[in-house]
Structure formats: structure tokens, C-alpha cells
Image: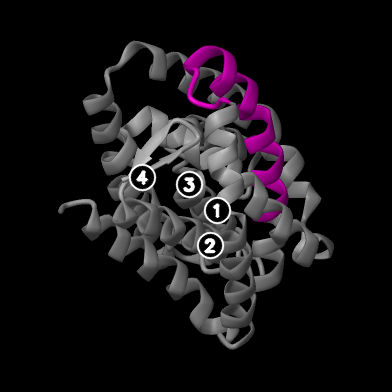
Amino acid sequence: MLELFGYSLSYATLALLMLVAFFIGMAKTGVHGISMFAIPLLAIIFGGKMSAGLMLPMLIMADLFAVKYYHRHANWRYLLKLFPSAAVGVLIGTYLGNVIDDEVFRNVMSVIIFVSLGIMLWMEKANKDTVPDYLWFAILMGTLGGITTMIGNLAGSVMALYLLSMRLPKNVYIGTSAWFFLAINLFKVPFHVFSWHSVNLNSFYLNLLCLPAIAIGAWAGVGIVKRIPEKYYRWLVISMTAVAAGFMLF
């Protein structure tokens, strides 16, 4: 066993933590869906609520890599629609996290993944002319994104649903997602620190230890996305979410 910043970790657990960090880096630079492998792994090791706090600084580090690379591709029209309702969703998610126990928390995480997958598949089959590019749809998705990002950092599928339904090009999709998650993850930090007490100096030091794995994952993600044709990228997002949803069964 290793004693690191107040955590007792086996070598296997430390290796899994580095794998989680690698997946997070890949996810933030375009291989969306793969981070859903990371979410259940951390939840199994640290518990639902504490794993959400432990993952948050890693997500922010990876967001910075993504914004650095894709910042010019963001569509701010969609971002401005999403931000206000997403902030409200974070407040709702904070309250829910304070009133449910950890087992229920993990079950909610699982349900969110499966529901998001089902909606994504349904939207992919929908006629693109009927996709609701309306303010009410953005408010609904922003609120759901805020709730799900607070409960387990699971807004990836919700945002994939919204942004894919807008038929954004590959790089615009990644750049818009990068800016959204950087802003909303920074907004979540005080709630994790002062309400859930799931982020502290010890957890942050452990996050810093994971930074090299995040950076390698981000570099790998950029390389993978460059090699994926536009027409296959949408199905990569959906298929990775599907595999991750199946992983939650075990």
C-alpha cells in the first residue's frame, strides 16, 4: 500500500487512477464517451460523491488542454443559450447530492448514462429538419447538463445530445464542448469545496500527480480525432457512450 496525501492506495488502485486520468485527457480533446469508463472506476474506488469531487480538478486540467487546442472553433451562440440554465442545474444537483446517500448517488449515475444513450440514439434517427433549435430546448438541456455534471460529472452525454442535434461540424462540436465544460466545471468548484466537502488540498495534490497522464491522454485524443472522418465521428461518440453504458452493468 502507498500513503499519498492522506489516501491509502494499492499499486493497482494507483494504476487505475492513472488510467482514469488518461481517459479524461482523451475525452476532452475529442474522444467523447471514453470518460464514462473513468466515472464508474472512480465511483467503485472512492464512492459516488467523493469520486465526483476527485475527478473535478482532473476535468478542469483536461478542459484547459482542450480549450487551448480547439478554442477558435467554439460556437458562442449555443454557449450563451446554455450557461444560465446550466448554472441553475448545478444548484439543483448540489441540493440532490446533499439529500441522497452514496448508493443512491451511484444508481442515479447509472440511470443517467442509460437514459442519455437512449436519447442520443433516438435523436440520431430523427429527421434533422425536426431537431428543436429553440431556446426552450437549450434551457432544458442546460438544466439537465448542470444537474448531471454535478451528480457524477455525467453531463457529457447530455451535451453530446444537444450539440450533436445541432449538427455541428466535428471541430466546432469539440470546441464548443470544451468552453462549456471549462466554465461549468470552474463554477462547480465552490459547491464541492464548501457544500459537499469532496475537494480539498489532499485531493488536489492527488490530482496534480495525475497531470502527466491527463496530458498524454489529451495528446492521444487530438491525434485520434485528426484521423477520424467527419461522417464517422458522430457514431464514435455514440458507440463509446454505448460501451460505457454496458460497462456500468458490471
The reply to whether residue 249 is visible in this rendering is yes
- Any mark on residue 42, and which? 4
Q: Which residue is mark 1?
A: 210
Q: Position of residue 146 (x, y in %)?
A: 54, 32
- Mark 1 residue crowding within 10 angstroms, few (<14) / some (14–19) / many (20+): many
Mark 3 and mark 4 in contact? Answer it, CB < 8 Å.
Answer: no
Residue drawn at x 37%, y 61% is 241
**How far is the residue under mark 3 from the one under mark 2?**
15 Å
Q: Which residues are magenta?
A: 177-200
Determine whether, in the image, residue 77 is placed left or right of residue 201.
right
**How far is the residue under mark 3 from the one under mark 1?**
26 Å
What colouring style does the render use? one colour
Task: Tell me the element at label 4.
Answer: helix
Magenta stretch: includes residue 215: no
Of 211 and 231, the residue lying toward us: 211
Q: Is residue 209 above or below residue 205?
A: below
Disc 3 versus disc 4: nearer the observer: 4
Residue drawn at x 60%, y 70% is 216
Dot placed on the residue nearer the N-terminal end, 1 or 2: 2
Mark 3 and mark 1 in contact? Answer it, CB < 8 Å.
Answer: no
Mark 1 and mark 2 in contact? Answer it, CB < 8 Å.
Answer: no
Mark 2 and mark 4 in contact? Answer it, CB < 8 Å.
Answer: no
The picture quadrant where one finds residue 45 is: top left
- Mark 4 residue crowding within 10 angstroms, few (<14) / some (14–19) / many (20+): many
The reply to whether residue 28 is visible in this rendering is no
- Any mark on residue 158, and which? 3
- Amino acid at pointer 2: Ala
Image label count = 4
- Amino acid at pointer 4: Leu
Dot placed on the residue nearer the N-terminal end, 2 or 4: 2
Determine whether, in the image, residue 159 is placed left or right of residue 61.
left
